[in-house]
């Protein structure tokens, strides 16, 4: 699903933080948790995996496609088609309804759109996912900004899951919730990804989630950080 080899990367104008990764991979249907303290490069690694940024050296291979071989716009289409992303701050459209937000990624991803429409139409599928994630029908047409943090997080998860993208990426999606709600959320997320067979790559600074995952990597063990020489 994901294969990274001999990658080096630094943010433009930020030479003091350079990352090096010899090898990183994610298997088909695997649930992988990446742990590391704040500032250890978790979000940076997710940006490399999703092609939001490109490495200065090395290869990022996703589902057999070398992201470096794609143009910027082809990479954007590839990301929309194959990744469902739950951002740390959810990045919902505040004035859009829950349903509008869930359906948004389908605009840029024809294959996902076809899969979502398979039984009863994409809108029906958006309603089904929201309900499966515990969002009551009465809230489906509420603007996202009027929902609680926990509800917004579930909307963000439904948006990542719609159309069954092969890889679900989650950047500390539980950091705004208390412990009990965190576990409930992961259970709901995984019951959906188990149905679609999607892989899950989640990052967190909280090691209490470990038991829910197939594999746990402590990021400082695979990522070298330091100054550019
Ligand atoms: P984590 O997610 O583990 O907290 P990050 O990957 O966000 O760590 O940050 C690692 C380093 O990369 C930090 O020094 C941070 O300032 C820098 N960084 C992260 N995102 C950006 C960005 N968009 N532009 C410039 N620097 C960034
Ligand atoms: Mg981060």
Image (spheres, rainbow, N blue to C red):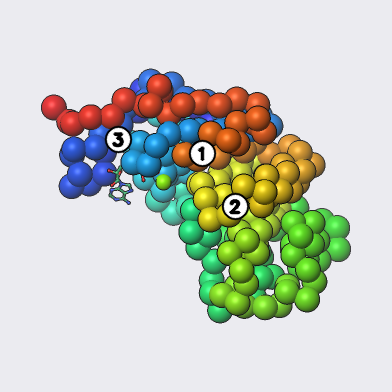
Dot 1 and dot 3 residues touching (CB under 8 Å): no
**Tag 1 residue:** 206
Of residues 182 and 24, the one nearer the viewer is 182
Of residues 202 and 116, the one nearer the viewer is 202
The image position of residue 103, as x and y in percent, is: 66, 65
Residue under the point 39% across and 37% down: 37
Q: Is residue 1 visible to us here?
A: no
**Tag 3 residue:** 9
Mark 2 falls on what kind of element? loop
Q: Is mark 3 within 8 Å of ligand 1?
A: no
The answer to whether 45 appears left or right of 95 in the picture is left
In the rendered structure, which disc, 2 or 3, sits on the residue that comes first in sequence? 3
The image position of residue 87, as x and y in percent, is: 51, 54
Q: Nearer the viewer, mark 2 or mark 1?
A: 2
Instruction: Using the image, determine if residue 80 lies above or below residue 50.
Output: below
Mark 1 to mark 3: distance in Å?
A: 25 Å
Residue under the point 58% across and 64% down: 149
The answer to whether 41 appears left or right of 176 in the picture is left
Q: Nearer the viewer, mark 1 or mark 3?
A: 1
Mark 1 falls on what kind of element? loop
The answer to whether 188 appears left or right of 5 in the picture is right
Mark 2 to mark 1: distance in Å?
A: 12 Å
Q: Nearer the viewer, mark 2 or mark 3?
A: 2
Instruction: Using the image, determine if residue 155 lies above or below residue 7.
Output: below
In the rendered structure, which disc, 1 or 3, sits on the residue that comes first in sequence? 3
Mark 2 to mark 3: distance in Å?
A: 34 Å
Q: Which mark is residue 20?
A: none
């Amino acid at each position: 699903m994901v294969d990274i080899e001999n990658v080096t990367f630094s943010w433009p104008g930020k030479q003091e933080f350079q990352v090096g990764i010899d090898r990183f991979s994610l298997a088909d249907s695997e649930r992988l948790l990446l742990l590391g303290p704040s500032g250890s490069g978790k979000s940076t690694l997710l940006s490399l995996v999703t092609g939001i940024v490109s490495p200065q050296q090395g290869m990022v291979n996703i589902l057999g496609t070398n992201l470096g071989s794609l143009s910027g716009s082809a990479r954007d289409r590839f990301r929309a088609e194959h990744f469902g992303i739950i951002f740390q701050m959810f990045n919902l459209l505040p004035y859009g309804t829950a349903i509008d937000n869930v359906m948004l990624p389908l605009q840029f991803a024809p294959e996902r759109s076809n899969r979502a429409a398979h039984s009863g139409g994409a809108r029906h599928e958006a309603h089904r996912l929201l309900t499966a994630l515990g969002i009551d029908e009465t809230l489906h047409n509420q603007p996202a900004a009027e929902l609680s943090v926990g509800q917004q997080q579930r909307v963000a998860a439904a948006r990542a899951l719609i159309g069954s993208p092969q890889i679900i990426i989650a950047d500390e999606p539980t950091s705004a919730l208390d412990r009990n709600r965190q576990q409930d959320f992961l259970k709901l997320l995984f019951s959906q990804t188990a149905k679609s067979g999607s892989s899950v790559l989640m990052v967190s600074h909280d090691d209490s989630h470990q038991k829910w995952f197939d594999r746990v990597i402590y990021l400082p063990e695979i990522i070298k950080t330091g100054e550019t020489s």
